[in-house]
Image: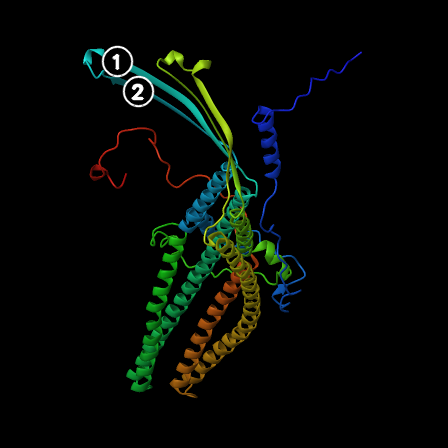
Amino acid sequence: MLKTVAFPSSKPAIGSPKRILGAISLMVMLSGCAVGPDYKMPSLFLPDHWSSAEEVTQSAKAPELSAWWRRLNDPMLNKLIEDAVAGNLDVATAKAKVREARAGYREAGGKLLPSLNASGSASRSKSASRSSTSNSSVTNTFQAGFDSNWEIDLFGANRRNLEAAQYGMDAAEEDLRATLLTLIGDVASNYAEARGLQARITLAQQTAASQRETESLIRNKFEAGASSAVDIANATGQASNTEANIPSLQISYTQTVHRLSVLTGRAPTELDNSLDKPEPIPIPTLPIPTGVPADILSARPDVRLAERKLAQSTSLIGKAEAARYPSISLTGNIGTSGSRLGDLGKSTSISWSFGPSLSLPIFNGGQLDAAVEVAQAQRDQSYIALRSSVLTALEDVENAIISLAQEQIRNEKLAVTVASYRQSASLLRILYDTGSTSFLDVLDADRSLYSAEDALISSNLAITTSYIALNKALGGGWDGTINSETPEIIDTDTGPHAIAPVSQRNIQE
């Protein structure tokens, strides 16, 4: 049979271990509360649907944003985007910010835990007698001990700070995603621009060559007495005018390739040979799904970034509010001292102290109240920034939809225009050869055809650019893995070592 035995009860004396432990338990329980507002995702007004443009978009289907650029079916573009994600310097900076935010989160978490420091000292001293130096004595003193401090987070200042650090870490990761989204859009746009400029340069060169052939034929006719000097002048002027377009197009093309190279983390001229061979402008397949406006809240990293910053600023209000309340810390130390090393640790050489300390703000000239108002105003700014980012996202999508839809219509009209001018130019050459029309009519037809063909190329580029802008506006970015843990610079020999004077160091090392 089991028997319960109760120890005799006794009222603990003030300052006894039981009393102290009871006070500690009470403070730990109180540390579960926090002041300041708890963050809640705000309600935001969003329209039910996008503008109607069913010829280029499908609002009923969810957007297909994963690796959207691959649907342009251009292996070179795919390669450039992968290179840019791996080598772009803005991405490297964003990854470093993620590491910084993660380290800040760990630092904030450490403030919730007690701190413990060890100390030790040894000294040797000599004291002399006033009457004679022969009576002087030499003594040794050895000391060792531990100091500990723990701030009881009664009103949640440190926990609000940890919350803010957590939201800041989330914001840094969203900033990295936003950087990748912008980068991919820029690479795709510049690549399409480069291919469009190549097509325009090729068209100008072919047109100029054809016009030079026409000039040669007119000279032959002039020498045979079948043409006038006016016709020669007009033919020469038109060919030269077309050739004059080529240098400006070549400048734009070279600058675009240089931008692409820098976006991938390379020197400006490193892609010159890779893109030297002309290729067609990548053309998207339409229509594309866009989903509903509410999708941008989860897809757009800049919107998620603004939301995380709002959460962070809300937590910082609680941190500022907690500074207006009392703070309690538990401090303690234990030490041992003796004249010999062997004396350390003996019960007779050990001393200790333990107890709480209270700090209560009484008068500070309104600084703490003002700090709360500052945090609240900053929270308002974050909320406004979130609303602004949502409106900007809606605007970006609507602009991209209307641009894509209207450019598609324009492209169809330009295709008809090119076909008509090509037929007109062909017929006028036949009529000119038979003497039924003037050479000026032929030149006008050639000029109109070249202008229409150049406009059609620009329209093809505009469709691709609008497609890129729409996917970017919907939140299409990089969804692959990103290693943000590896630093750009890995330090070596960071332990204790001799250091050379600054003037003797190699700056490149």
Establish if 123 lies above or below 272.
above
Q: Which mark is residue 409?
A: none
Q: Quadrant location of the N terminus?
A: top right
Which corner quadrant of the image does residue 10 belong to?
top right
Cα gap from disc 2 to disc 1, whole angstroms:
14 Å
Q: Is residue 290 left or right of residue 241?
A: right
The three-letter amino acid code for the residue at tag 1 is Ser
Query: Residue 190 placed where, x, y %?
Result: 43, 59
Q: Is residue 23 left or right of residue 247?
A: right
- Residue with the mark numbered 1: 137
| Image point (64%, 65%), residue name | 47
Nearest the eye: 116 or 432: 116
- Residue 275 locus on image (x, y percent): 40, 55
Q: Position of residue 52 (x, y in %)?
A: 64, 69
Q: Is residue 335 left or right of residue 67?
A: left
Circle 2 crowding by C-alpha within 10 Å: few under 14, some 14–19, many from 20: few
Q: Amino acid at mark 2?
A: Ser
Residue at the (21%, 17%) spot, across then down = 130
Above or below, 448 relative to 128? below
The one nearer the camera, 397 or 431, is 397
Residue 283 in view here: no
In the rendered image, residue 170, in percent from the top left (x then y), is placed at: 53, 47
- Give the residue furthest to the front: 131
Helix, strand or loop for disc 2: strand
Q: Front-most of 109 and 329?
A: 329
Extreme residue in the right direction:
1
Q: Which numbered marker is on residue 123? A: 2
Confirm whether residue 105 shows in the render.
yes
Query: What colour-coding does the image apply?
Result: rainbow
